[in-house]
C-alpha cells in the first residue's frame, strides 16, 4: 500500500520551525494513525498479562449490589 505524501506548511520564527499548518483531513488522518498505534501497544501489553475471567452471573450480581448500596 502506497502512503499518501503529507502536505503541510511550516511557520518559521527566527529561522526555526515554530508551527505546522495542516489540512484538516491530514490532521484527522494523523490522529487516527496515532490512535491505532496506541491501541496496538495496549493490545500487546494486554497479551503479555495473565487473563482473568469471571462468570457473567457474578459480574451482574456485583453490579446490582453496587447499585443497591448507592441508593441507601
Image (tube, rainbow, N blue to C red):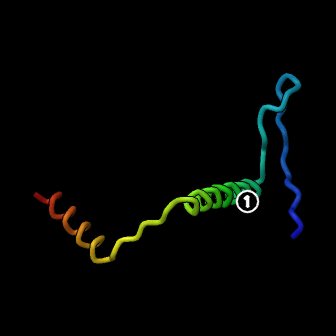
Secondary element type, mark 1: helix
Residue visible at 28% across and 77% down? 57
Choose top left, top right, bottom left or bottom right for residue 25.
bottom right
> Where residue 44 appears, x then y in whole percent?
62, 60
Callout count: 1
- Which quadrant of the figure contains the N terminus? bottom right
Foreground: 37 or 18? Answer: 37
Please tell me which residue lies in front, 43 or 24: 43
Q: Residue furthest front?
A: 50
Q: Which residue is drawn at 55% across and 60% down?
A: 46
Residue identified by numbered label 1: 29
What quarter of the picture does the C terminus occupy?
bottom left
Is 33 placed above or below 22 here? Answer: below
**Up/down of 40 relative to 7, above or below:** below
For label 1, the crowd category at 10 Å Cα-Cα, with few meaning under 14, some 14 to 19 and many 20 or more, is: few
Closest to the observer, 71 or 5:
71
**The quarter of the displayed image where residue 34 is located:** bottom right
Of all residues, the one furthest to the top in this rendering is 14
Looking at the rendering, which quadrant does residue 4 occupy? bottom right
**As drawn, is 2 to the left or to the right of 72?**
right
- Where residue 11 appears, as percent x and y from the top left, is 82, 35
Q: Is residue 72 left or right of residue 17?
A: left
Amino acid at each position: 500500500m502506497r502512503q499518501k505524501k503529507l502536505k503541510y506548511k511550516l511557520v518559521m520564527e527566527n529561522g526555526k520551525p515554530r508551527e505546522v499548518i495542516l489540512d484538516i483531513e491530514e490532521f484527522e488522518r494523523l490522529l487516527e494513525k496515532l490512535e491505532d498505534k496506541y491501541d496496538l501497544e495496549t493490545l500487546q501489553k494486554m497479551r503479555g498479562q495473565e487473563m482473568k475471567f469471571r462468570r457473567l452471573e457474578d459480574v451482574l450480581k456485583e453490579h446490582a449490589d453496587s447499585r443497591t448500596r448507592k441508593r441507601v
